[in-house]
Image: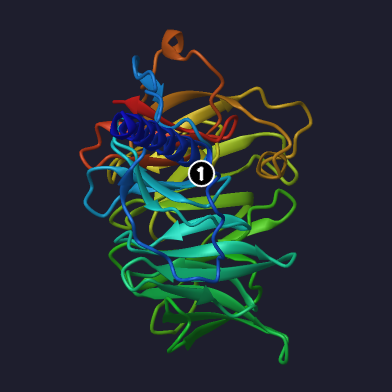
């Protein structure tokens, strides 16, 4: 009888321990790791509610995202959770969610993936000041770049280009270095370090232009990566921004219709600045992506408040737009919708556009809710 009583007690105690363990694992809050520690490269499945994926335009994530991109194996999308800084991956349907980095990071303002998607440059809020940093997921190492770097871009998978303000000489310059800032070399002097940078594809040239501002005349210039003469490609517009096609033969441009203008204009021109063509589509470069060397996909904004100075008011976050979606042939000017109006069932303010490898899907981040969406083409 005593043995039977003991056996029943032992079983009961084991069941209690098991239930307590399940409760503990279910409700324990995840710890926030110190951002100074080394990154742990773990990959695990995440149990998430199934996202409805019916229709031509659907949500891919349920959380706000930062810097989504096609992964290195080209079979999924990886992105940062905008609120936690953790890194996740999903397939093109939004399924199969995996954790690529469970480390929680704060103060990330933007992320720039290397072309091979194995490294990132980051813009961070560090003690109230903006600083650029780097991280390699291959080498599991990272750090901060020099505090006087003003803007930067990837030149290739190992090298970066950046503008730099020398606080001693009070001069600006364009430079190249390894992604961690080592082995730097000067390319050219600059009039200002407040610029946007982009390599011109399939050339040995770097293009740069002053940050889009409707009150300032825009000037697009280029210089060889090995240094040399700076050439002006385009000038005379205000608030302009630019996007090169994949072979560097054409550039897309958006600009204000006048100084401190209230409307935007989209156009294209040849690599030397000639053959400008007005595409008659008032949108922003941030709402466009090249489909191929000749055609682009763009979101066309509406719901722009009266007396908005463009592009300033939009980029300052003063309002969100309600977009429709188009394909434009930049050589012929032909336009067609890629989503019928009846299939747009919400407010979409599209930014950060990118395509799947087979160009069957167009992805974008909706500024209204900061989630990732997909359009089936």
Specify the color scheme.
rainbow
Query: What residue appears at the point 47 percent right and 37 percent down from the top-left corner?
Result: 20
Query: Image height check: is 331 above or below 62?
Result: below
On the image, the x and y values in percent for residue 248 come to: 33, 58
Q: Residue at 46% x, 87% y: name it.
A: 184
Residue 89 at x, y percent in the picture: 35, 44
Q: Residues within 10 Å of mark 1 (few under 14, many from 20)?
A: many
Q: As rendered, which of 270 and 125 lies closer to the eye?
A: 125
Q: Residue furthest bottom?
A: 168
Residue 20 seen in this snapshot:
yes
Toward the top, the furthest residue is 342
Q: Is residue 277 visible?
A: no
Residue farthest toward the right in the current orientation of the protein? 307
Q: Nearer the viewer, residue 264 or 157?
A: 157
In this rendering, is residue 323 above or below 266?
above
* Residue bearing the label numbered 1: 285
Residue 321 appears at what percent x and percent y?
62, 27
Residue 374 x, y percent position in the rendering: 37, 29
Which of the 4 quarters of the picture holds residue 377? Answer: top left
Residue drawn at point x = 43 percent, y = 84 percent:
227
Q: Residue drawn 55% across and 44% down? A: 29
- Helix, strand or loop at label 1? It is helix
Residue 282 is left or right of residue 303, and the answer is left
Count the numbered circles shown.
1
Q: Is residue 304 above or below residue 272?
A: above
Task: Name the one closer to the observer, 52 or 13.
Answer: 13
Q: Quadrant of the N terminus?
A: top left
């Amino acid at each position: 009888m005593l043995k039977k009583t003991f056996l029943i007690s032992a079983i009961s105690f084991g069941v209690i321990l098991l239930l307590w363990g399940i409760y503990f694992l279910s409700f324990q809050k995840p710890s926030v790791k110190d951002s100074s520690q080394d990154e742990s490269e773990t990959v695990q499945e995440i149990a998430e509610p199934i996202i409805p994926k019916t229709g031509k335009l659907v949500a891919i994530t349920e959380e706000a995202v930062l810097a989504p991109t096609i992964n290195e194996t080209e079979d999924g999308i990886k992105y940062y959770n905008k609120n936690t800084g953790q890194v996740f991956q999903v397939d093109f349907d939004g399924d199969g969610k995996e954790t690529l980095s469970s480390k929680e990071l704060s103060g990330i303002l933007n992320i720039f993936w290397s072309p091979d998607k194995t490294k990132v440059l980051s813009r961070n809020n560090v003690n109230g000041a903006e600083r650029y940093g780097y991280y390699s997921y291959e080498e599991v190492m990272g750090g901060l770049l020099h505090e006087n770097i003003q803007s930067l871009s990837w030149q290739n998978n190992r090298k970066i280009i950046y503008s730099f303000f020398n606080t001693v000489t009070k001069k600006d310059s364009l430079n190249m270095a390894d992604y961690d800032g080592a082995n730097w070399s000067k390319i050219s002097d600059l009039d200002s370090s407040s610029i946007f940078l982009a390599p011109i594809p399939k050339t040995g040239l770097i293009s740069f232009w002053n940050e889009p501002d409707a009150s300032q005349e825009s000037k697009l210039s280029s210089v060889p990566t090995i240094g040399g003469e700076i050439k002006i490609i385009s000038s005379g517009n205000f608030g302009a921004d630019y996007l090169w096609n994949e072979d560097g033969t054409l550039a897309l441009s958006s600009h204000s219709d006048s100084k401190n203008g209230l409307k935007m204009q989209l156009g294209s021109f040849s690599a030397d600045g000639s053959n400008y063509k007005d595409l008659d589509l008032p949108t922003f470069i941030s709402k466009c992506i090249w489909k191929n060397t000749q055609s682009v996909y763009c979101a066309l904004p509406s719901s722009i408040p009266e007396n908005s100075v463009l592009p300033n008011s939009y980029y300052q976050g003063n309002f969100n737009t309600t977009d429709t979606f188009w394909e434009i042939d930049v050589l012929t000017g032909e336009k067609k919708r890629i989503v019928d109006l009846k299939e747009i069932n919400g407010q979409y303010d599209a930014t950060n556009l990118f395509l799947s490898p087979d160009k069957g899907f167009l992805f974008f981040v909706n500024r209204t809710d900061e989630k990732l969406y997909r359009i089936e083409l």
